[in-house]
Image (cartoon, grey):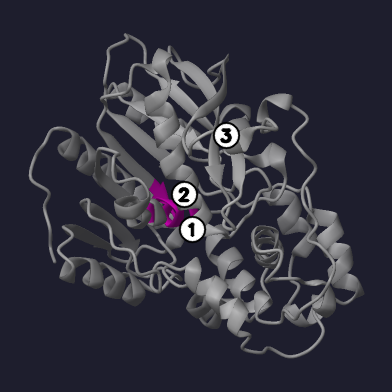
Amino acid sequence: MRRLSVVALAAAAAGLGHLAPAVAAPIYPIADGDGFYWAPPDVGNYQPGDVMRSRTVPAAGFPGATAWQLLYRSSNSAGAPIGAVTTLLLPPGGGMNRPLVSYQPFVNSLGTRCAPSHSIFDGSMQEAPALNLLLARGWAVAVPDHLGPVSAYGAAKLGGRLTLDGIRAVKRFGPADLAGSPVGMAGYSGGGMATGFAAALAPEYAPELPLVGAAQGGVPMNIGKLAQDVGLQRSPLFGLGFAAAMGLEREYPNELQMDRILNPAGFALRDQIANACTQQIIDAGANKSFTDVFYGAMDADPVVIRVLHENSLETFPGVPRIPIFEWHGGSDQVSPQLVREVTGRYCAAGTPVLLNMVPGADHGTAIIAGAPAAFGYLADRFAGLPAPSNC
């Protein structure tokens, strides 16, 4: 199941290469039926990271923890104000300014009900049990809905911005007592992309945040190149790639419009999965290919290329200024060489990077192999130890 983000991002990049101008709008998800998620009419009057609404929720699956959900102000890729949600878990025992980890899960869905603020408690988030390991260390854990209010699956730069504004929100939220907390970030695969973008955006977007380090694994560094590697073949997970194309279209509606190049089967698939979670998307698109849903041949649209570059860490010019732990499977379908090249660029800019290539691990197995070291790495950063580097 942890190959999902790989195939999805690759197929999205390949599918978007077909796009041509059109007048129809993307298909957006049905709004969450819970009014807590709805941004107030005056959302533009708030600053990024301001808490607009809060509530406690049952902490199912996290014994002894207290769970809060915060609606905070952020911005989409066009700069328009939006509301976003993060879920905050506080371990038992109290204590001010305890370490805070923002954990970005991999989310492979289009429906609002599939967001982490739901899946963390309903049993559908595969990574949720591991968060108890962080709580057991006495750390607070924030889990943002980093696809945003329209489930813009594939929009990694947006995910980085939502992560940083979610951290701002948690630190500004008085009842949590985290205003002075040091902050670490972690995530794998699609969650690693959001984490990586948060680290790269932070020096300019959120320089005030006391970030001590980021642990990111299995990160696809370039969506377009990944498409060339694994996205142009039939796959049982093709539906996820199609879904990621839909998510990017939602985030860039004026640049990416699918209607001109969808054939009847493509329109039917888009309608079928517009509000779907992971397994529904997989089932609907199983073993299809681009020729099954699109008209025409691939082309190199400069607008598409710009959007893909904007959402690929290899081509994004920002450089993290915090220590980075990067782990990756040596046999990962996601190019290990691109990971070496991007972390090399960070090293050349003076960023301390510890790169751990897990011998023989693929995308599905590397997460388990690298997570303990990733959590230990953050513990050392919280303890103020010098950041190791193998640059």
Q: Amino acid at mark 3?
A: Asn
Q: Which element is circle 2 on?
A: helix
Residue 77 in the image: state x and y as whole percent: 57, 57
Left or right of residue 22: residue 346? left
Q: Residue at x 22, y 61 (%)?
A: 355
Q: Residue at x 48, y 30 (%)?
A: 50
What is the count of numbered marks? 3
Q: Is residue 253 magenta?
A: no
Label 3 environment density (alpha carbons within 10 Å; few <14, some 14–19, many ≥20): few
Disc 1 is placed on an element classified as helix
Q: Which residue type does callout 1 highlight?
A: Lys
Magenta segment boundaries in residue numbering: 187-196
Q: Residue furthest front?
A: 45
Where's residue 347, x and y in %? Answer: 18, 67
Specify whether 49 is left or right of 328.
right
**Which one is earlier in the sequence, the residue at label 2 or at label 3?**
3
According to the image, label 1 marks what residue?
A: 157
Left or right of 195? Residue 215 is left
Instruction: Assess disc 1: are there few (<14), some (14-19) or many (≥20) residues with their C-alpha within 10 Å of its C-alpha.
Output: many
Q: Which mark is residue 161?
A: 2
- Say which quadrant the C terminus sits in: bottom left
**Are discs 3 and 1 less than 8 Å apart at CB?**
no
**Residue 45: assigned label:** 3
Instruction: State which quadrant residue 259 falls in.
Output: bottom right
The secondary structure that dominates the magenta segment is helix
